[in-house]
Image: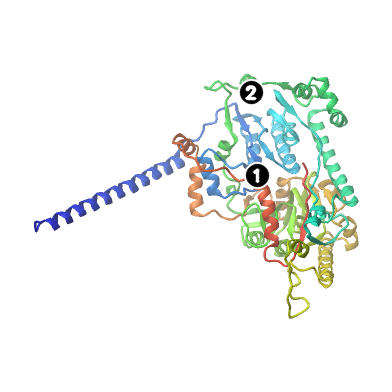
Amino acid sequence: MSKDSPNIIVRLLRGLWNALNFTRLLIFNLIFLILAIAFFTAVFSSRPVIQARTALVIDPKGDIVEQYTIDPAQRALGNLAGNPPKEVQLRDLLHVIDAAAKDARIERIVLVPDEIDGAGLATLHELGNALDRFRAAGKDVVAVVGNAGQTQYLLASHADRILLDPYGAVMLEGFANYRSYFKDALDKLGVEVHLIKVGQYKSAAEPYVLNGPSDASKEADRYWMGGLWQDYLAEVASERKIDAATIEDDIAHYDERVAAHQGDLAKLALEQKLVDQLATREEARRYLREKGVADDDGSFRQVDFKNYLAMLPPEGLKHFGTQVAVVVAQGEIVPGEQQPGMIGGRSTAQLVRMARDDDHVKAVVLRVNSPGGDAYSSELIRREVAETRAAGKPVIVSMGDVAASGGYWIAMDGDEIWAEPTTITGSIGIFGLIMTIPETLAKIGVHTDGVGTTPLAGSFDIRRPLAPEIEAILNSVIKHGYDQFIGNVARARKRTPQEIDAIAQGRVWSGSQAKERGLVDKLGGLNDAIAAAASRAKLGGNYGVRYVEREPSTWERFVMSFGESGAMVRLARSVGFTLPGAWLDRSEVAEISGILQTLKGKRYGAFAHCFCEIR
């Protein structure tokens, strides 16, 4: 072997290393260059130019929510992958509609409600009012409908003209609240359920101790759901200029009506005057071209509501000085720090505190959309509301679709409480629920025994029977909690505890019914509540509106800049960018998660919760 051989090997290895290093740097530089180009494209890409006589297309997909329940980075990546999360913020839709009403370039709204999955009656009522304001500005709304259930149709009814697909249908059926009951199943499993509640109508935990709803539960549900249904019928009848009694009669005899039209549901809807015209999507486009201006693609001149929203200044940047702060409380009320879409006893209380400590904020609107949850967490938020008022800042509560039980608890101390007529509220009551499983274990030959240092030691072990002394203690605690609840409501509403008890007892009310009973001050939507807050703070018209929420991280802002850029979305889709799997359906997960979070770390659960969903 030559003495130069080691030098040759060293030079060879050094050359390989340099080549690898060069390749590594080249790849990283290329990645950086691509990201830089993408970033500047996202920032400086041209936005759609809106011409005169443009139609604004509003086609919400998924749930209409008070705030996103999916974090900004996930939303942005979903947009890039062509699989956006199925959520639209109510505030964004209201902002777009009200801005379009003042925009001379926007001639009409084309509403496509088919893919709205979830929206409460109060949300739909508020959106309907916004469409009415748009029409009052001298512009028209055309609804293009494939199939419409009650949710989609209530919004469509606010259009000047409804076009229904000839193979479509409008299905109005009324409201229902059916639940599964587990007593027999739990008995077979040997599970002993111990329910401690105060409130004749507090029926949230009945499925665990009964095989069907109690008479009191049926009575209360029939009353508040009946009130909501009459409000629904009145709204549709008013918008469509038809008699509410006729709609009810058609529903009661729907089988006969369908048979008379040989099963043609679209023609039936046309005869019932629920729609104005039958039209395929192409016929609808032709109709809109004739009413407006044709575009280069053979459709009509239009702008999507998301693109239009991106052109508008954000609500929070309207004014950098005096502000009305909006704090959103949406979802189950559970302990600790929570992400948007859930109400954390600590995190939501902190948002109220942030608004109170901000010198620019002169008034606060607490927007509540919650069926309640953990009683202690509800109390933490209520205290912050009371402290904010004590600090001299008015707090106006705006109730959304539901503000019941714990949702009412956090609302009670507002200077004013606003609700929509169709808000679900009340349910002032409290319950505790403990399940023990000694008989369940005995069925499989497992027994529990041992010793404790005191009579109470091990009392909450679910493997052991619940001692009568513990049940007596819990009865006293739950009764005390209810007395506190109605006592606080009485103080806040300037009534006696006896007066509040007469309308409490866990009973649910619609917004209109709650106003009649003094639980709500005024009927109106979020914008009404914001105006009321500004009026109480004597701000005149010179103020901005800012949502107080968790600030997105630098990374989230960076990803959002890509995901919200139309140019970047087109680029990502052109190169086939996808995300594995599908978005998780959050609705059921959120409910289960809320219950589990409430129970976590507790010996027992003290709940101020209302299971008052309608379908």
Q: Where is residue 246 drawn, in percent x and y?
A: 87, 28
Per the image, the residue denoted by label 1 is 91
User: From where the camera sits, is residue 143 visible?
Assistant: no
Instruction: Residue 62: name its quadrant.
Output: top right
Q: Quadrant of the C terminus?
A: top right
What is the quadrant of residue 405 in the picture?
bottom right
Q: Which residue is mark 2?
A: 281
Earlier in the chain: of badge 1 and badge 2, it is 1
Viewer-nearest residue: 404 or 398: 404
**Quadrant location, the N terminus:** bottom left
Secondary structure under badge 1? helix
Residue ranking furthest to the left: 2
Residue in the foreground of this view, choosing between 586 and 273 = 586
- Of 572 and 399, the residue lying toward us: 572
Q: Position of residue 233 (x, y in %)?
A: 82, 35
Q: Where does residue 449 sit, x and y in percent of width and height?
A: 74, 73
Residue at 77% in and 31% down = 171
Picture quadrant where residue 288 is located: top right
- Closest to the camera, between mark 1 and mark 2, is 2
Q: Which SS class for mark 2?
A: helix
Q: Nearer the viewer, residue 156 or 579?
A: 579
Q: Please give the name of the residue rendered at 70% of the width and 66% of the height, measured from the top-left corner.
A: 602
Residue kind at label 1, given as amino acid type: Arg
Where 593 falls versus 279 (above or below)? below
Three-letter amino acid code at the position of disc 2: Arg
Q: Residue at x 90, y 48 (%)?
A: 219
Q: Position of residue 150 (x, y in %)?
A: 76, 35
Say whether residue 613 is visible: yes
Contact between labelled residues 2 and 1, with CB atoms less than 8 Å apart: no
